[in-house]
Image: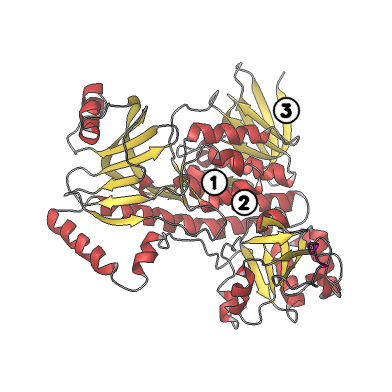
């Protein structure tokens, strides 16, 4: 007898992207089924870099502290010439989104934590060894045929399907979406080792016209090496133990050699799906885009996909938004994913200059660049990283307000604020995981009742940011309590104190801006003042669709 299951969202693929999406959907209360054809987690690392944007997502689902326990935080990277000189280094210390910008991890440990996170949610199920065989996307639902580990077949009916099943995505093939782009002809030998005692607490890129090498330290005395192979190198020969040993000996010198866990030859792809949505089926992560590993953003791009898509699926499945909102996923994510693929490809070209002459010219260019005012910090703080900015989608712009409009469609800062009785908290922890209407030195609860009533019906948190130490002077020996509203301020808003002045500086740069509409993915949906809150709310209601009119 065939098993039939029903769910709101079926996620195909339980890698980092799929399990991140499922944790977010669980946080939002969406009925979700996750399936993966593999019986367990692959026991070797693939991705190794995780950025501050991804850590902010894991903060939203309550797993960031557990993940950080297994992560090397705030790791620098150094770039060397073929003659050994360090010509550039990246060592970001700023934390605009509340977390270190460059971190290193072991993927099996991260995946295990994410899967354990799913156990917290009654509405989320994970089934391993379940393989998608086919799907039929109709007008009202998607019907999937799934092969179970015991050879039986299950039928899964869902409102939506998300293919997070990797570069060879079954979901992408089933709906006929093309993956366009190129595959570099060069082959790279990737070697993962344990028991590593190399004294190099940084990532290193040894650029060379002949054989560039990437070296990445990993937690628990693991390390990764990537060696470019020559056009005539045989893949089988390249992975032989004696060949791998000879390559490692050049790096370790007199030190004991580490234990080789695995060695494998890879090709690097620069490809993006022609669309991230077809009907009720979505693509995310490697199923939607593939990029070379030179900038460490492959997995992080997939987490951006999950973070963007999850709240939109939650809004639609709960009836708080209409179907048109889901179109904004492709509108917002595909353009940035394409830019990130191109950027990673260009970074890789820098690793292998065409000749020594080209390399010397690049070295001189970097020396000259870092003499320019601000250029050194630009490189050191990794400000060259292409950040998403959503020019269209679930955002409302006001072109006549240039400094206001510049903030719309970007990820919002995450400063530390003070709540309650001198309690410090990161902004996201204070406002919660859903929408927030943030009034900067203005209580949003005091504005147009119709507009504010709609935001409250949507589940948005009203937040009143007050200047630091602006309340009444407390009696001697007692602390000022910010748990309630200060005198003269209507109740209904969470009051937070701008102890570090981040909101002060934000407003000084945008005179007159009083209200920030913060989306669940922490991107700014709109910026307005008290006179335009009603019109801004009306435009956002239109963007969210028919379901948002109730």
Of circles 3 and 2, the one toward us is 2
Could you tell which of marks 3 and 2 lies nearer the N-terminus? Answer: 3
| 106 is higher (above) or lower (below) than 92 | above
Residue 12 position within the rendered picture, expressed as x and y whole percent measured from the top left: 58, 36
Q: Which quadrant of the figure contains the C terminus?
A: bottom right
Q: Is residue 364 left or right of residue 280?
A: left
Q: CA distance from mark 1 to mark 2?
A: 9 Å
Q: Is residue 432 left or right of residue 295?
A: right
The local secondary structure at tag 1 comes to loop
* Circles 3 and 2: CB atoms closer than 8 Å: no
Q: Is residue 77 left or right of residue 438?
A: left
Q: Residue at x 60, y 77 (%)?
A: 404
The local secondary structure at tag 3 comes to strand
Q: Is residue 186 left or right of residue 56?
A: left
Q: Nearer the viewer, residue 507 or 467?
A: 467
Could you tell which of marks 1 and 2 lies nearer the N-terminus? Answer: 1
What secondary structure predominates along the stretch shown in magenta? loop
Mark 2 lies on residue: 309
* Circles 1 and 2: CB atoms closer than 8 Å: yes
Mark 1 lies on residue: 284
Residue 422 position within the rendered picture, expressed as x and y whole percent measured from the top left: 73, 59
Could you tell which of marks 1 and 3 lies nearer the N-terminus? Answer: 3
Q: Residue at x 66, y 82 (%)?
A: 512
478 magenta-colored: yes
Q: Which mark is residue 4?
A: 3
The span shown in magenta is: 475-481
Q: Residues within 10 Å of mark 2 (few under 14, many from 20)?
A: many
């Amino acid at each position: 007898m065939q098993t039939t299951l029903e769910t709101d969202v079926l996620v195909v693929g339980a890698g980092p992207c799929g399990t991140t999406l499922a944790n977010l959907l669980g946080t939002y209360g969406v009925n979700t089924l996750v399936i993966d054809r593999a019986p367990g987690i692959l026991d070797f690392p693939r991705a190794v870099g995780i950025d501050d944007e991804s850590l902010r997502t894991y903060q939203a689902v309550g797993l960031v502290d557990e993940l950080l326990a297994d992560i090397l935080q705030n790791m620098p990277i150094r770039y060397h010439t073929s003659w050994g000189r360090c010509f550039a280094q990246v060592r970001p210390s700023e934390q605009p989104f509340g977390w270190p910008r460059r971190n290193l991890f072991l993927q099996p440990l991260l995946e295990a934590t994410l899967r354990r996170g799913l156990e917290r949610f009654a509405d989320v199920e994970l089934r391993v060894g379940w393989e998608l065989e086919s799907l039929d996307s109709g007008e009202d639902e998607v019907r999937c045929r799934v092969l179970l580990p015991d050879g039986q077949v299950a039928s899964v009916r869902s409102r939506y399907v998300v293919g997070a099943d990797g570069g060879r995505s079954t979901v992408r093939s089933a709906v006929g979406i093309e993956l366009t782009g190129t595959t570099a002809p060069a082959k790279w030998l990737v070697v993962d080792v344990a028991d590593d005692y190399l004294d190099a607490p940084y990532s290193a890129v040894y650029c060379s016209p002949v054989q560039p090498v990437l070296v990445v330290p990993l937690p628990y005395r693991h390390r990764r090496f990537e060696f470019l192979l020559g056009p005539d190198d045989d893949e089988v020969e390249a992975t032989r133990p004696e060949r791998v040993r000879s390559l490692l000996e050049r790096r370790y010198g007199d030190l004991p050699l580490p234990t080789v866990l695995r060695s494998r030859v890879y090709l690097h792809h620069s490809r993006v799906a022609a669309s991230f949505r077809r009907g009720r089926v979505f693509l995310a992560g490697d199923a939607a885009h593939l990029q070379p590993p030179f900038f460490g953003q492959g997995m992080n791009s997939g987490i951006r996909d999950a973070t963007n898509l999850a709240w939109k699926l939650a809004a639609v499945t709960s009836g708080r938004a209409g179907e048109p909102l889901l179109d904004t996923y492709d509108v917002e994510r595909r353009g940035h994913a394409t830019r990130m693929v191109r950027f990673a490809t260009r970074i890789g070209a820098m690793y292998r200059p065409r000749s020594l002459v080209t390399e010397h010219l690049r070295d001189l260019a970097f020396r000259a660049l870092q003499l320019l005012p601000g250029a050194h910090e630009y490189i050191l703080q990794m400000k060259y990283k292409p950040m998403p900015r959503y020019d269209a989608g679930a955002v409302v712009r006001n072109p006549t307000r240039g400094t206001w409009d510049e903030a719309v469609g970007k990820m919002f800062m995450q400063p530390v604020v003070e709540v309650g009785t001198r309690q410090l908290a990161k902004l996201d922890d204070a406002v919660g995981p859903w929408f927030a209407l943030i009034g900067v030195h203005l209580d949003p609860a005091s504005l147009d009742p119709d507009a504010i009533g709609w935001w409250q019906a949507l589940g948005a948190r009203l937040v009143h940011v007050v200047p630091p130490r602006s309340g009444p002077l407390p009696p001697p020996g007692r602390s000022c309590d910010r748990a309630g509203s200060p005198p003269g301020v209507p109740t209904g808003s969470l009051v937070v104190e701008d102890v570090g002045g981040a909101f002060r500086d934000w407003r000084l740069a945008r005179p007159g801006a009083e209200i920030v509409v913060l989306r669940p993915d922490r991107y700014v949906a709109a910026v307005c003042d008290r006179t335009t809150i009603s019109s801004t709310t009306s435009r956002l209601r239109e963007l969210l669709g028919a379901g948002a009119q109730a």
